[in-house]
């Protein structure tokens, strides 16, 4: 129930104005978002890498309905990749970028989104790094996977994202668990109907484990995106027999940083998903919906006068 309320608030312009206008909102947001400018993203990346962590950067923005806006998003990624390369932060994929296809034109035309994704992939290759195509709500899943297949013809290292709460995902894992395929497995953060997605947390967890078994048994490169201690432990058990470096853990910026460091200190590859940009509201609300403890933290900070 609480998750549904938060996700509804993520689409409410009145709530958005209230949150954005609260005096301490921006300070609280910085726990989950590195900042609004490319300088913030670069600075955060450098700090994380100094701690032995790798990074995936997301220039926040989605539901782009104008070609000019999509082009602006692509150019933001090109600037980011150039800056990361110049700062020596991208070698061997230590800092990659994550791209939402809706931010680069998917709602306008699938071909436009594909072409824009190819522009980002080309810049990433020049910077000695990679791109992961983010997954969004279920209405975009087929289109996103189609674009992924087309982009991988020229850039086979492009990463995919699959969401365990969708009924279809175990089959998608089988399709993508192939040599050279990078797949980020997450639970999913959008409000989806029961016809396409599991509704109970226990069902989502069981699906996650089934999907993870498929990926770990395959020839691809699994990316375990979870903060759940049980799932992290299960991933470690399933990875027995695979060398470190043939898979990785992924966690969100600002969530369980001590666990991120613990895994990295144990020799695991840990990638921190770092969002930046001024379109932070929708991202923030999905993070609050995923974990009630995040909501408690946020509300306490907003109520604080100190």
Image: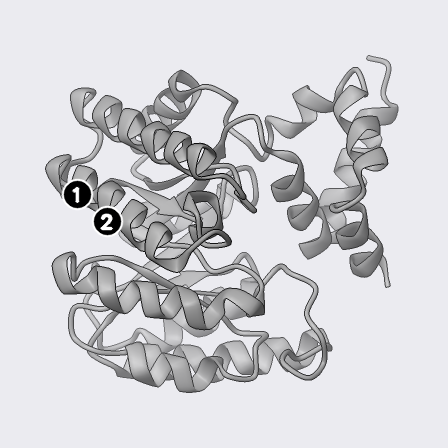
Question: Can you see residue 282?
Answer: yes
**Closer to us: 250 or 162:** 162
Q: Residue at x 81, y 46 (%)?
A: 9
Q: Residue at x 29, y 59 (%)?
A: 159
Residue 100 on image: x %, y %: 44, 49
Q: Is residue 26 above or below residue 52?
A: above
The crowding category of the residue bearing disc 2, from other C-alpha atoms within 10 Å (few below 14, some 14 to 19, many at least 20), is many
**Is mark 2 in CB contact (under 8 Å) with mark 1?**
yes
Q: Is residue 303 above or below residue 293?
A: above
Q: Which residue is mark 2?
A: 118
Q: Residue at x 31, y 55 (%)?
A: 114
Hey, which quadrant is residue 290 in on the image?
Answer: bottom right
Q: Which residue is mark 1?
A: 122
**Closer to us: 110 or 96:** 110
Image-based side of 115 in relation to 204, left or right: left
Image-based side of 2 in relation to 31, left or right: right
| Quarter the C terminus occupies | top right
Residue 182 on image: x %, y %: 27, 64
């Amino acid at each position: 129930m609480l998750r549904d309320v938060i996700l509804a608030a993520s689409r409410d312009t009145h709530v958005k104005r209230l949150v954005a206008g609260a005096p301490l909102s921006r300070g609280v947001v910085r726990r989950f978002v590195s900042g609004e400018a490319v300088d913030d993203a670069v600075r955060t990346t450098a700090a994380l890498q100094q701690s032995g962590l790798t990074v995936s950067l997301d220039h926040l923005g989605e539901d782009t309905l104008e070609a000019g806006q999509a082009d602006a998003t692509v150019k933001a990624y090109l600037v980011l990749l150039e800056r990361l390369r110049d700062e020596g932060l991208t070698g061997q994929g230590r800092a990659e970028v994550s791209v939402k296809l809706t931010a680069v034109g998917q709602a306008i035309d699938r071909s436009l989104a594909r072409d824009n994704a190819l522009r980002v992939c080309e810049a990433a290759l020049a910077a000695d790094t990679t791109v992961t195509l983010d997954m969004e709500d279920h209405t975009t899943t087929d289109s996103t996977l189609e674009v992924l297949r087309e982009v991988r013809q020229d850039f086979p290292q492009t990463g995919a994202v699959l969401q365990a709460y969708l009924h279809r995902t175990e089959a998608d894992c089988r399709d993508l668990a192939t040599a050279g395929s990078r797949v980020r497995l997450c639970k999913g953060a959008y409000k989806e109907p029961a016809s396409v997605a599991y509704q109970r947390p226990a069902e989502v967890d069981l699906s996650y484990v089934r999907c993870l078994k498929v990926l770990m048994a395959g020839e691809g490169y699994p990316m375990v995106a979870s903060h759940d201690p049980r799932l992290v432990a299960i991933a470690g058990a399933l990875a027995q027999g695979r060398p470190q470096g043939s898979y990785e853990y992924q966690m969100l910026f600002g969530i369980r940083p001590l666990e991120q460091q613990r895994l990295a200190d144990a020799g695991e590859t840990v990638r921190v998903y770092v969002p930046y940009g001024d379109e932070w509201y929708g991202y923030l609300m999905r993070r609050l919906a995923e974990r009630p403890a995040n909501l408690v933290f946020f509300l306490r900070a907003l109520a604080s006068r100190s």
